[in-house]
Image: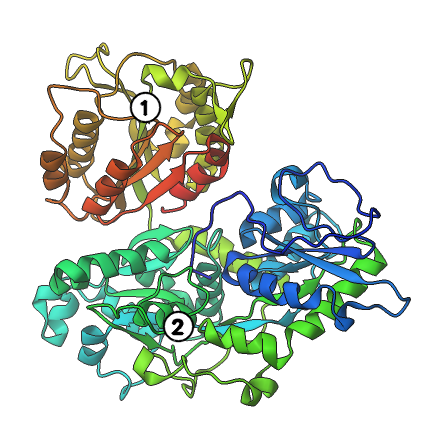
Amino acid sequence: MGRLRTALRLVPLVPLLTSACAYRESTTVVPLGDPGRCVPVDIAAAPETASLLADTASHFNGSSSARMRDGACAFVRIETVDSPIAARELFDNWPDSERLGPAPAAWVPGSTMWGELLNARLADQRRRPMAPNGTPFARTPLVIAMPTPMARALDYPHRPLGWTDLEQLAQDPRGWTAYGHHEWGAFRLGKGNPNWSTTGLDATIALAASPSSASNTHLLERSVAYYGDSTQAYFENWRRLATRSTSSALTYLSAVINDESSVVAYNTGHAQDDVALDGRASRPALPLVAIYPKDAGIESDNPMIVLDAPWSSSAARAGARQFTTFALRPAAQAKVAAAGFRPGAPARAAAVRADLVVPSNGVDATARTSAVAPASPAAVEQAIAHWQTTRRRARVLFLFDVSDSMGDVASLDGQTTRDGPTKIALAQAALTAGLDQLAPDDDFGLRIFSTELSNPVSPNWRDIVPLGPLAVRRRALSSAIPSLTPQRGSPLYAATRDAFDAVARRADPQRINAVVLLTDGYNEDDHDNSQTALLAHLATNPNIPVFTIAYGNGADLATLRKIAQATDAWNFDARDTRDLAEVLPRALASF
């Protein structure tokens, strides 16, 4: 699902309960509830529903519903883990328990498709499936979120629309002029990367299953402004731009493939990570309409999957099944509806008020679509492989800070040890691994920046590996990245402006042209220190997004957010240096 992006460290969501000393000590750094003499039932949940499940667990634990047949009791602990990260950890038998919490007995990903993908990758290695069919906890259909004026121009909802209609609009060189609105420009789409985003994965499955659009998905991909590890950035940029100018919001994006609950959250004035949509927030200046694709519909069902995992005891699995039954009761499902979801069990929907899934919030509970058949594990894997061949290619210049502070020992969760790794060492490892997010025919270049560099063009930066096809540049990158060393000061503004200009001068209109900026500090160039001038310069070309990564606790987060916003991009937060190993690949998943 695309509703939110979460920090990579876990949030303790279940209240602590004190009890007798049968609790087994854990070495994890994730705070855990004390199960006392009860059976601990650890559940890894996607951030979309983790808070809802934690609230449900707080009512389950200690209740009669937690009593098991043998007289023991179950104690549920919710750990927040993004779906793609959980899938990877489960495939590897959950090696990172210290950071993510104990290996789970159950898993609640954003969609059933994550379980199918996990099983497919296990089958590739002749391993048994781990994720059987789950029980939906909270459902939300895949939709095409579109600004109301644009939906009206397409005569929606009077004229049903589907994926083929979007493909035709995307390939029409007239763009919105064909519908009487030249001021909106070309059709521009926001879409999640299916390797990281639940809605991106669901959309990939739906498009592959649509008989009318499957052979033309490349037409839709060409209209993507940039991809994302979630779709939160698109909604926040829409909201921010609309408060300043509706016209700028309309030219930013024409549509975002997302889920119904995100449209409800946006239209009720809430952030994408709000759980209770109480109606007290201010509605956006530019409302959205949820278009339900007529030719292939799919739901993010947030299934409660009791894992068939080697580490899971029969008692823990039994406790997980009892908790699943409890989570489908009306009291728990009422809170699901209050968060903008549909109840997990359609047959029980009548027992739960769904005041939010109404036309005044841009959605329609009665909309009819042709639901796609459940995808097999092999079909999910094939759909992603096909997307890799059709997705819009990128031209990315990576701007790497090598100022002297990058030589400092990395602070891990606020603690610095004398013999720990340096910040530049962690960044080198993260960038090397992150390159796997790109395709061999993506263009990629590596530029460093610091003061007093040896470069006849500018002392503020130097191209280490020039922009070119990744397949051609990979050997040079493999040699250059480990060789980077800390230098002197940080000419952040000058280096950012020059990198932006370099990409803009040779932009390829068929590709996503972008800069990714990684820095751990502030601008230290007294000769070029006007933030206002930099932001004004970046705003001159909206087709060159600058994605920023705030690295380390000394990074100028406020300025990096402004740089990203000036180009309608997104800032990634890695102020805890441990997070960079996940954050940097997420940033490169924008392409």
Work out whether 16 lies above or below 377: above
Name the residue rendered at 45%, 75% in the picture: 211
Residue 425 horizontal/vertical position (percent): 47, 20
Dot 2 amino acid type: Asp
Quadrant of residue 331 within the rendered picture: bottom right
Q: Is 41 on the left or on the right of 180, as rendered?
A: right
**What residue is shown at x 23% (from left), y 49% (from top)?**
568
Mark 1 vs mark 2, CA separation in Å: 43 Å
Precedes in sequence: disc 1 or disc 2: 2
Q: On residue 290, which mark appears? A: none
Residue drawn at x 42%, y 59% is 273
Instruction: Pick whichever, 239 or 436, lies toward us.
Output: 239
Front tag of 1 and 2: 2
Q: Vertical placement of 186 versus 466: above or below?
A: below
Q: Disc 2 on helix, strand or loop? A: loop
Q: Position of residue 16 (x, y in %)?
A: 66, 53
Viewer can see residue 221: yes
Q: In terms of depth relative to the viewer, which is nearer, 93 or 82?
A: 82
Left or right of 516 in this view: 388: right
Of 96 and 387, nearer the camera is: 96
According to the picture, the residue beneath numbered tag 1 turns out to be 401
Does 456 sit above or below residue 151?
above
Residue 440 placement: quadrant:
top left
In the rendering, at what x and y percent does residue 424 appear?
Answer: 42, 21
Q: Residues within 10 Å of mark 1 (few under 14, many from 20)?
A: many
Check whether the beta carbons of the residues at disc 1 and disc 2 lie within 8 A of each other. Answer: no
Q: Amino acid at mark 1?
A: Asp
Query: According to the image, label 2 marks what residue?
Result: 278
Mark 2 neighbour class, 10 Å CA radius: few under 14, some 14 to 19, many 20 or more: some
